[in-house]
């Protein structure tokens, strides 16, 4: 079972992507997740701001960004505000998970019911994407849809 989450937020549309992961996932596996679950659906990024997790500071990532022509920036150590949008998304997601778990909500899945937070991620993402954001004047789900 995956117990960690990589959070990616599109600065333009405010659309989040949540990638369940293990703290010991390799940089290659993390790159595969980014490619298969994000870039293949949304396209390449102009700029990526990352924390200084060793998964993201390896030579593999440097080469990936060089190949695709994206700019790679790192948040400043002990200054998480550098990537405030993602940090705020993490706070919002943690609050949503706590609320769901506090009320003992159970979600149906193929083998029965569960309280496991990982299984809540698709519902939480939908909830976030359909919530109004004043900075874009609409919901992330409708942003750019005319």
Image (cartoon, rainbow, N blue to C red):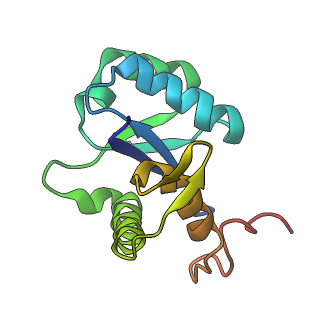
Task: State whether residue 40 is above or below residue 139.
Answer: above
The N terminus: image quadrant? top left
Q: Relative to 124, is 97 on the left or the right?
A: left
Residue ID at (34%, 57%): 83
Can residue 11 be seen in the rendering of this structure?
Answer: no
Q: Relative to 6, is 46 on the left or the right?
A: right
Residue 98: x percent and y percent?
A: 34, 69
The C terminus: image quadrant? bottom right
- The quadrant where residue 94 appears: bottom left
Residue 129: x percent and y percent?
A: 62, 66
Between residues 40 and 21, which one lies in front from this camera angle?
21
Residue 50: x percent and y percent?
A: 35, 43
Between residues 12 and 26, which one lies in front from this camera angle?
26
Residue 19: x percent and y percent?
A: 47, 41
Q: Relative to 145, is 36 on the left or the right?
A: left
- The quadrant where residue 100 appears: bottom left
Can residue 64 be seen in the rendering of this structure?
Answer: yes
Residue ID at (36%, 60%): 90
């Amino acid at each position: 079972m995956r117990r960690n989450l990589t959070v990616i937020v599109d600065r333009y549309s405010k659309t989040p992507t949540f990638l369940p992961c293990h703290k010991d996932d390799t940089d290659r596996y993390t790159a595969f997740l980014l490619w298969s679950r994000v870039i293949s659906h949304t396209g390449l990024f102009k700029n990526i701001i990352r924390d200084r997790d060793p998964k993201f500071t390896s030579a593999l990532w440097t080469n990936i960004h060089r190949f695709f022509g994206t700019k790679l920036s790192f948040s400043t150590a002990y200054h998480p505000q550098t990537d405030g949008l993602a940090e705020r998304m993490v706070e919002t997601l943690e609050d949503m998970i706590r609320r769901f778990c506090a009320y003992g909500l159970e979600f149906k899945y193929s083998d029965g019911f569960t309280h496991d937070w990982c299984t809540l991620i698709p519902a939480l993402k939908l909830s976030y994407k359909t919530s109004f954001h004043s900075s874009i004047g609409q919901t992330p789900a409708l942003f750019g849809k005319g």
